[in-house]
């Protein structure tokens, strides 16, 4: 993406072909001399934060310190769970199918009805905690058979395996506690980037 910058203002943006539709270039590429003569500058991108933790929306192209820059708005995602509500602010509930609901004479019975269980929009803390638990389960699953064998046939679990499984559970507990204690998404990212799962074997 390029911008034409004249008198400290952006007058147009687009590809070279869009900016100069009636101009042909040797090899199909505009050289640096042409760009300089026509006040064409590369558009650079402003900061886009990690989309795991932020909603990133594209804005306008603006001059920043004289450089045409694609702007972005980075909005932190919600950390905590919150009740799900409709557009009028009414609480939403988990629905189930009620096959016996009477829809009136001559109409098929049954409809979706509310339960007493509230619908919840999960925050990042819940999402990341579930990820940690999922990783824990996957890491332990490779040696679960040894635990079953011990229970069913009294065959001892190798000490190295017991040490490994304990280390996995310790890291899980450490991460869950750290996630619960963060106060913003940047701190949460630091926690998740610092995962230190043990290696089996």
Image (cartoon, grey):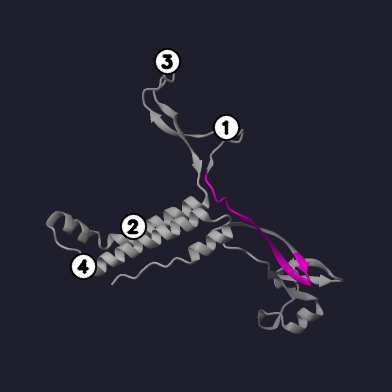
Please state which of residues 61 and 139 is positioned toward the viewer in this rendering: 139
Q: Nearer the viewer, mark 1 or mark 3?
A: 1
Please tell me whether residue 3 is drawn above or below residue 172 in the rendered image.
below
Which mark is first along the chain, 2 or 3? Answer: 3
Please state which of residues 17 and 126 is positioned toward the viewer in this rendering: 126
Q: Which structural element holds mark 3? A: loop
**73 inside magenta stretch:** yes
Q: Which structural element holds mark 2? A: helix
Q: Residue furthest right?
A: 7
Residue 137 got which mark?
A: 2
Q: CA distance from mark 2 to mark 1?
A: 37 Å
Residue at 17% of width from left, 55% of height from top? 151
Q: CA distance from mark 1 to mark 3?
A: 31 Å
Q: CA distance from mark 3 to mark 2?
A: 52 Å
Q: Main secondary structure of the magenta part?
A: strand
Residue 98 got which mark?
A: none
For the residues labelled 1 and 4, say whether their Cβ atoms are less than 8 Å apart: no
Q: CA distance from mark 1 to mark 4?
A: 55 Å
Q: Nearer the viewer, mark 2 or mark 1?
A: 2
Which mark is first along the chain, 3 or 1? Answer: 1
- The image position of residue 109, as x and y in percent, is 39, 23
């Amino acid at each position: 993406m390029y911008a034409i910058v004249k008198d400290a203002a952006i007058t147009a943006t687009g590809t070279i072909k869009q900016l100069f539709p009636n101009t042909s270039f040797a090899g199909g590429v505009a050289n640096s001399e042409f760009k300089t003569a026509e006040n064409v500058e590369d558009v650079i991108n402003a900061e886009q934060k990690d989309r795991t933790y932020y909603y990133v929306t594209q804005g306008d192209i603006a001059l920043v310190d004289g450089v045409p820059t694609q702007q972005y708005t980075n909005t932190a995602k919600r950390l905590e769970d919150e009740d799900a509500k409709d557009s009028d602010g009414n609480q939403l509930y988990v629905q189930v199918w009620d096959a016996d609901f009477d829809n009136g004479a001559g109409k098929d019975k049954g409809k979706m009805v509310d339960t007493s269980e509230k619908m919840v929009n999960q925050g990042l803390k819940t999402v990341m905690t579930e990820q940690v638990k999922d990783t824990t389960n996957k890491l332990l699953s490779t040696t679960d058979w040894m635990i079953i064998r011990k229970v069913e046939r009294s065959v001892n679990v190798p000490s190295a395996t017991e040490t490994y499984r304990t280390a996995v559970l310790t890291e899980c507990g450490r991460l869950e506690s750290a996630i619960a204690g963060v106060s913003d998404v940047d701190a949460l990212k630091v926690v998740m980037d610092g995962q230190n799962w043990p290696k089996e074997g």
